[in-house]
Amino acid sequence: MRCLLIASLLAGIVGSVSGHRAPVTARKSLGFGPVHPHAVYRSNSHQITVNNFLPQSPDADPLEVARLFIDDILGPNQVQSSYKIRPDSYTDPSTGITHIYVRQVVHGIEVADGNMNINVKDGKILSYGNSFFAGTPPALIATPDSRKLRHLHREYCEDLNAELEKHLSVFTSIQNKQTPMGGQVMAELDASAGHLTHLHSSNCEFDGLADEMASKRPQAIGDIGDMRPALLQFMVAATPKSEMVNVILSKYDEHLAKMSVSGVNHLTPDGEQTYLYVDNVPDTVNPVKASIAYTQVPSEDGSIELVTVWKFEVEMENNWYEAAVSANAPHRIISVVDWASDAPLPVPETPKEPASYNVFAWGINDPSDGNRTLQKENFDGLASPVGWHSLPFVNDPSFKGVKPSNAFYRNTSTTFGNNVFAQENWEGQNAYLNNYRPDAGSTSMYDFQYKPKVSDSDEAMDVARSYINATVTQLFYTSNMIHDLYYRYGFTELAGNFQQYNFGRGGREGDAVIANAQDGSGFNNANFMTPPDGTNGRMRMYLWNTANPYRDGDFEAGIVIHEYSHGLSTRLTGGPLNSGCLGWGESGGMGEGWGDFLATSIRSTANYSDYPMGAWAANRPRGIRNYPYSLDETVNPSTYQTLDKPGYWGVHAIGEVWAQILWLVSQALIEEHGFSETLYPPLPLENGTLPANDFYRPAAGKKPLVPKHGNTLSVQLVINGMKLQPCQPSFFDARDAIVLADEELTGGENFCTLWKAFSLRGLGTDASVQGRTPWGGGIRSNGFATPATCSE
Ligand SMILES: *[C@@H]1O[C@H](CO)[C@@H](O)[C@H](O)[C@H]1NC(C)=O
Ligand SMILES: *[C@@H]1O[C@H](CO)[C@@H](O)[C@H](O)[C@H]1NC(C)=O
Ligand SMILES: *[C@@H]1O[C@H](CO)[C@@H](O)[C@H](O)[C@H]1NC(C)=O
Ligand SMILES: *[C@@H]1O[C@H](CO)[C@@H](O)[C@H](O)[C@H]1NC(C)=O
Ligand SMILES: *[C@@H]1O[C@H](CO)[C@@H](O)[C@H](O)[C@H]1NC(C)=O
């Protein structure tokens, strides 16, 4: 009841300030799950205390080292609990660190949130994260009573309500005081409360329904039960369309009967999870992938229990969910991650002539920042061995003919290549193969007109469409530049990057980024969906109706970089095949923050400046975040404790705090090591060695290459940190992983620089948090202390 009251109160306020605000398209997105109080991340050798494990010889097989270590951690528990080392584990050639991802298995069934990530080098454990279930496993299939599940669900709904109440009280107090900034703060509270209310209504309102739904839960190991009721229940919460909810509820049995299940017991050769496929699920665009698993659920007395769940991968028009729904009626949604993230906002036969593009060059953030010029295809032999416009015939989903017998690669004359498929998507649909792309013919010259002009509002869309050639060209260029940049910092095939073909260099292929320009599914936003390695990522860029002529997000590099970086952080955290590690709370927030930080670092120059995000597209000088990124506390006052403020439950607000902290960290490194004009490492010479230049420090032995300057080093440490941190990292875990990354890369040269910079905004050694909830709850305390060795 209370929620409805807030919704209407806030809706009134929106009306009164809407003149100053761009209309926002709210894509519905669910994201929550249990907090694991027992999860640990240990990144400091003193903390890695074990029973009998001893470091092994430097040339020991890292997998064997990990096995010994895991056996030691599990100890006597191992009788009931086993594990499997996931196939996306890899040794990173640039650091020599082996990242090993482990999934817990109980009674032959995976524990979906029982993860270990173990980082091994030279026979030693550098760090590890562990969220394995540590209690006594249930007898075969778990049958917790529904009272406990109800309790869990009620707790979520209560946490949500508490957060809403916090909003309401701040809102009322501002309203009473009538402060000059009141309108703005109220508008922000309103937007934030709108999302919370929405989450509440989709998760907490259909409380009675669950009990009525029939269930055939799995009765024994090997019995798969019937997951359809649980799936249908999930769709009620997931669908963004209220009429669809009614359709499902009124024709429940009919829908159930139509849903067909296939693929039973189809075990893949590499021993991966068995999946079932469910067809004809309302409001989905592809068959739902389903599997049975255990998941860990906190119960009333604070202990953790294993619950049998159905895991679903549900692809919808605007969302791509990974959900765990209790296999016992009532079918509670236990956790859900949306793989979609919004922003507000062989050697080539012969090298081809590089293509040219008339674009805003790399480093120009948006049209207010410079003019278009002719830029050449990057041709980084390491990152894109066959350039941006070639891909093997057999890896090309658009090729329907017969492959010429003497050719392996197909050359395209459009914005379609091994890393990126860029096209218009005015219809806003999921199909993209036959959408329009600019064609350079035989010239390799993508030089198209971009002349936006003021028009009547009903013609604004036509004006934008008139330069579609230029906008798709820009999106293709920027996305490929990002691919090549991140590649050189370690987002390679093995690490789960996005490529149609992997040149035999490991990882899973068939996953170029589908990049849609002027996507018709929304306005004033952008988003990116990151399924696991081997399935295409999808970027959707929107027009912004914030000005006349409309502004086209494709031309704002910061937005494209932010979006692509979701793919980077999601694939690197917890391993390439686990896309569920940055779903909500602090980890989801950092998923946003990394993108802002990287976009801001890419546009920054030797002359320091503060930067907002999305200012051009949003036509608002301070951009789409609360504050610009700044060294100045009066310009950006965010600290760790800011996360406790109302309005900071959502991932974008949390991300803004993280990006601000990283910005200070990078500035501290720049102060220490100077600034490199380019973030791109030099191209290797014909003989495969790097030319001597100023980018890396002189290489010593087989040590990893160390970027010499502060800005390049900070990008490297942030990316290496993503690989070292656990699934669902907290701010503390991500901070510790960056400190460890420096330890590994430079021998810990920047230990104190990093700690001092983190402590500036409260993320020092004595920072603390109590009682975190997925809605941003908990009590945080800033800590400004640094390790004892740093205080002189
Ligand atoms: C692709 O282009 C390269 C260089 O221009 C050429 O050697 C190769 O034969 C082309 N491939 C096909 C299938 O035309
Ligand atoms: C673009 O070029 C025009 C004319 O050459 C110039 O007046 C304008 O200042 C330039 N814009 C930017 C953002 O540099
Ligand atoms: C895009 O470019 C093609 C080829 O140059 C041209 O024929 C077409 O008219 C252009 N489209 C628009 C909307 O300008
Ligand atoms: C930085 O600012 C100084 C002084 O304003 C100027 O001389 C210099 O050209 C600027 N450098 C860059 C890279 O913009
Ligand atoms: C690679 O080529 C460069 C330039 O030709 C040369 O200076 C360097 O010594 C070569 N390195 C090796 C390992 O052959």
Image (tube, rainbow, N blue to C red):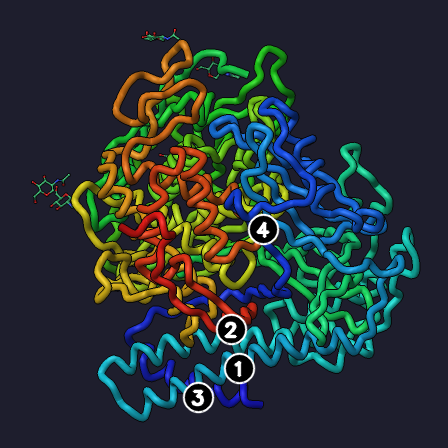
Is residue 279 shown above or below 143? above
Dot 3 alpha-carbon crowd within 10 angstroms: few under 14, some 14 to 19, many 20 or more: few
The x and y percentages for residue 76 are: 80, 49
Circles 2 and 1, Cβ within 8 Å, touching? The answer is yes
Distance from Cα at disc 3 to Cα at disc 4: 39 Å
* Closer to us: 409 or 276: 276
Disc 3 marks a residue whose amino acid type is: Leu
Regarding mark 1 in the picture, which secondary structure is present there?
Answer: helix
The x and y percentages for residue 305 are: 76, 65
Disc 1 marks a residue whose amino acid type is: Ala
Disc 4 marks a residue whose amino acid type is: Cys
Which residue position is annotated with label 1?
A: 162
Circles 3 and 1, Cβ within 8 Å, touching? The answer is no
Is residue 583 shown above or below 484? below
Q: Which mark is residue 777?
A: 2
| Mark earlier in primary sequence (2, 4) | 4
* Closer to us: 764 or 9: 764
Regarding mark 4 in the picture, which secondary structure is present there?
Answer: loop
Which residue position is annotated with label 4?
A: 727
| Mark earlier in primary sequence (3, 2) | 3
| Residue for point 80% across, 64% down | 327
